[in-house]
Image (tube, rainbow, N blue to C red):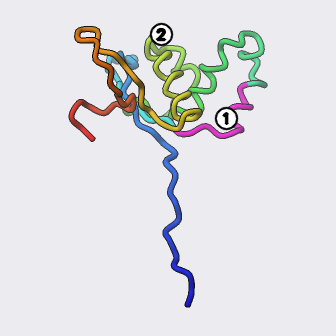
């Protein structure tokens, strides 16, 4: 008898998100839905040789996010110049989202309701209340 074969495990490599404010393009269209892929070792190393990062280490996250964000709205050519144009709250959201999917392996966050002080988890990947 041959051993039973199991289906190979599939790993999730791209995560969808919804920006708090959204990227506003030249025509005034707001883009909020997007996707980010998992970072590779190369993604983490490449910005270290970027002259913009050498001159200003805080620019590292802008370059890195420009590499791993695959879509914002209908825009698929995401790059550091586009990331520079995001609102500060959206940049902070993407930095946290990056850390969650790459370091922690999930997009959940513990929060507390300011009105009733109840604690619960939310999914930062843009799911709406009541969706699974």
Q: Among all residues in the image, which is located at the extreme bottom?
A: 1
Residue 71 occupies quadrant: top left
- The answer to whether residue 64 is above or below residue 106 is above
- Between 85 and 16, the one lying in front of the other is 16
User: Which disc is residue 73 wearing?
Assistant: none
On the rendered structure, is 46 left or right of 34?
right
Residue 16 in percent (x, y) is at 41, 36
Residue at horizontal 24 percent and vertical 38 percent from the top: 131
- Secondary structure state at the residue bearing disc 2: helix
On the rendered structure, is 45 left or right of 105?
right
Residue 37 in percent (x, y) is at 53, 39
Quarter placement of the N terminus:
bottom right
Is residue 39 rendered magenta in the image? yes
- Between 62 and 117, the one lying in front of the other is 117
Residue at horizontal 37 percent and vertical 19 percent from the top: 111
Q: Which residues are magenta?
A: 37-47
Q: What is the spatial separation of the Cα atoms under label 2 and label 1, in whole angstroms? A: 22 Å
Main secondary-structure element of the magenta-colored stretch: helix
Residue 25 in percent (x, y) is at 39, 19
Q: Which residue is mark 1?
A: 43
Are there few (<14), some (14-19), or many (20+) residues within 10 Å of tag 2? few
Quarter placement of the C terminus:
top left
Q: Which residue is mark 2?
A: 88
Residue 112 in percent (x, y) is at 33, 16
- Secondary structure state at the residue bearing disc 1: helix
Residue 72 occupies quadrant: top left
Is residue 83 rendered magenta in the image? no
Residue at horizontal 52 percent and vertical 76 percent from the top: 5
Name the N-terminal-most of marks 2 and 1. Answer: 1
């Amino acid at each position: 008898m041959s051993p039973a074969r199991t289906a190979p495990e599939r790993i999730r490599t791209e995560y969808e998100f919804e920006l708090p404010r959204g990227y506003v393009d030249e025509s005034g269209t707001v883009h909020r839905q997007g996707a980010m892929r998992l970072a590779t070792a190369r993604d983490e190393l490449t910005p270290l040789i970027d002259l913009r990062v050498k001159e200003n280490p805080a620019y590292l996250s802008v370059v890195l996010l420009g590499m791993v964000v695959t879509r914002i709205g209908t825009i698929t050519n995401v790059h550091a110049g586009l990331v520079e144009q995001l609102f500060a709250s959206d940049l902070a959201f993407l930095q946290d989202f990056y850390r969650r999917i790459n370091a922690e392996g999930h997009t959940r966050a513990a929060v507390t309701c300011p009105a009733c002080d109840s604690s619960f988890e939310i999914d930062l990947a843009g799911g709406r209340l009541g969706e699974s």
